[in-house]
Amino acid sequence: MTNDILLIAFDIASPAMLGWLLAAAAPLLIHLWSRRRYREMPWAAMRFLLAAVRSSRRRMRLEQWLLLAVRTLLVVLVVLAVAEPIFERGMILLGAAERVHRVLVVDGSYSMAYIPTDTSRFERAKELAALIVEESPQGDGFTLVLLSDPPRVVIGNPVFERGEFVEELQRLQLLHTSADLPRTLSAVEEVLAAARREHPRLTRQEVYFLTDLGRVGWTPPAEPTAAADFRRCSKRLADSAALVIIDVGQAAENVAVTGVGSAAPFATVAEDVEIQADLRNFGRQSRGRQPVELFVDGRRVAQQQVELAADGEAAATFSYRFDTPGDHVVELRSEGDGLDVDNHRWLAVAVKPYLRVLCVNGKPSGEAFRGATDYLFYALSPRAGDTDRALIHPEVVPESALMELDLSRYDCVVLANVAQFTSSEARLLQTYLKRGGGLIFFLGDRVLADRYNRELGEGQGGVGLLPAKLETVVEESQYRLDPLEYRHPIVQEFRGQERAGLLTTPVEKYYRLSVPKDSPTKVALALGNGDPLVVESPLYQGRVILVGTSADASWTRMPVWPSYVPVVQELVAYAVGGQIEQKNLRVGQSLGATFATVTGEAPLTIQGPTGRSEPVRMRTEGDYSSWSYADTSISGAYAVQFGEPVSRTQWFAVNVATAESDLAQFTADEFRSEVWPDVPFIHQTTWAAMDEPPVTAAMRSSPLPKTLLYAALGLLILETFLARRFGYHAP
């Protein structure tokens, strides 16, 4: 038998209401007032009445005191019920109840979309968050933060109305992003600091993380400085608030479509397009005959089955020919697990009748194969007499015609041995890149390096189009090219084809190219002495390629070498390939494009995967207009719809970053040692006990106020009964 003594802690949630206890004195004052003395006038019959009164005086006095006690207690009970007394186990508390600020951090990364039975982890987390709010005492404040990338402060100022908070909680939507833990902790810290300033009566802070504890989202930063900042922020948070982790996850198997792409950098109606889907099994069980389906514009056109080993990868390849030009949406789908978000992957494909390439000739000549673009023309269109089957339709113009052309009609512009560019021409090329075009520069004997660097390069007055700075002309013959292990896509087709002539191409003259440090410029092909020969860089929505030698035979024998045709076509294909990238993005990246002003005058709306349409405003600059759209937190196909006079639809594809598809989790011990080794926190697992109320460190609400009101109602009925009985019974 225990010797512990259970003390009842009495506390008041609304101490200001206790002032109304003075009203309990009203029945006593009325009683005393009613006892004031009157002048006594004796008369004969009075003696008999007084004798009867004396015999029942004691009984009447007891009845009056009983009524007085009932009425006084009635007032006390009503006042206490409104003041909300709280009973706690422990010592007797003095003063007002401790008000708590509860920050509910709901994990919104897409691993929370996993459905183990009939409800997703995200919905379970919302149910539990609502339960925490409903079980909290009156007067506590609540804020809501979504753990995502980037984090979202849904309710930043503490809300005291529970119904209002729960309504906002129910509207919370899962995003198809990962989790940015460091920025989320910083956001929570800011929310707590603001609440302490604006609501000082919230004397205690608690932070609840409702999450599946996925390793991808909860692993601290690897970079030392970022890791140190993360640890400091975590400790500050633990010093200012009680941290509670509610783990709603469990072991799970998952298969994801991790990639989708086309082998060709562009698609035309003239040829079949090879489409490949990459799959990965993140689970420990093998998946035999895993189905993979190909959908084009919402219609299933093919299906395959692949074998997936445990923690293994596989690929499914489809061949498809588009019947009509224009934008098409390709979807690769592989279903059969509890996480549907990563079972789909989309590809937006702009199908063209053919590619239009503009060749700007900087050195025209009346003799065959003496001009700067003569070899280029035939390399781009080997089937000169069969234009119906040609994938590329080149067009040659002199450099003087550049400003007269509408460059938006061309998929790629090749500038060969153009001497110099005016500032107007430089801005024209810059706008063309903003539209997603591809630029290729071939140099030569007419090129003025200082004008190139001034107008096209970085620095004052330049538009920053060149991926490298032009230095001096080198006249030392090189008889070997270095493909740099064939790492770059431009030369990847030559891997294993050493006899194709690429490696032995002689170069007599070239411009030495200086690649800026810390720039996105990549060297695709180098000379035997290590100097870059072909460099490229992404810029705006397009790509720029710079070739350090000529496109004709004046500086190199490359145009008469067997590798020339495939090299030129790979250059064009890679330059145009940037247009595919701008239509296929990751969740969180902004959509956008630049058009001619006539297109920009058309009304524009965007319809996302959820079916919701939203108007978008165009920004006009000179002859071109642009638009951007940043709300891409949901994966899927986005339709960009232009009204009159354009009346057309463009498609964009937004896909998840599949790192979050790995559903591996931290256990409580692993989390304590690897994530928060020096941070105190409470770990709770409530997945299997959702019917039980959550355990909190704050005082729990008490049913006492309702009990007091029921007691007051009972006393009111008792008082009515006693008053009637005592007033009408016979003496």
Image: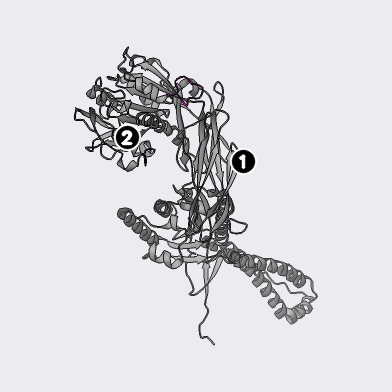
**Amino acid type shown at disc 2:** Leu
Looking at the image, residue 316 lies above or below residue 361: below
Q: The disc labelled 1 sits on which kind of residue?
A: Arg
Q: Report the front residue among 42 and 251.
A: 251
Image x and y of residue 23, in percent: 59, 63
Q: Which residues are magenta?
A: 382-392
Q: Quadrant of residue 431?
A: top left
Q: Position of residue 395 (x, y in %)?
A: 41, 19
Pointer 1: residues within 10 angstroms few (<14), some, or many (20+)?
Answer: some
Whichever of callouts 1 and 2 sits on the residue coming sooner in the sequence is 1
Can you say whether 163 is above or below 707 in the image? Answer: above
Point 39% across, 22% down: residue: 378
Q: Which mark is residue 502?
A: 2
Residue 447 in view, yes or no: yes
Q: Which mark is residue 300?
A: 1
Q: How many marks?
A: 2
Residue 320 image offset from top left, x and y in percent: 55, 36
Q: Tell me if 365 is positioned left or right of 265 in this view.
A: left
Residue 554 is situated, as x and y percent measured from the top left of the image, at 26, 22
The answer to whether residue 159 is seen in the rendering is no
Residue 391 part of the magenta segment: yes
Taking the view exactly as shown, the residue that stands out farthest to the top is 366
Res 218 quadrant in image = bottom left
Residue situated furthest bottom in the rendering: 1
For label 2, the SS is loop
Q: Please, is residue 523 above or below residue 69 in the view?
A: above
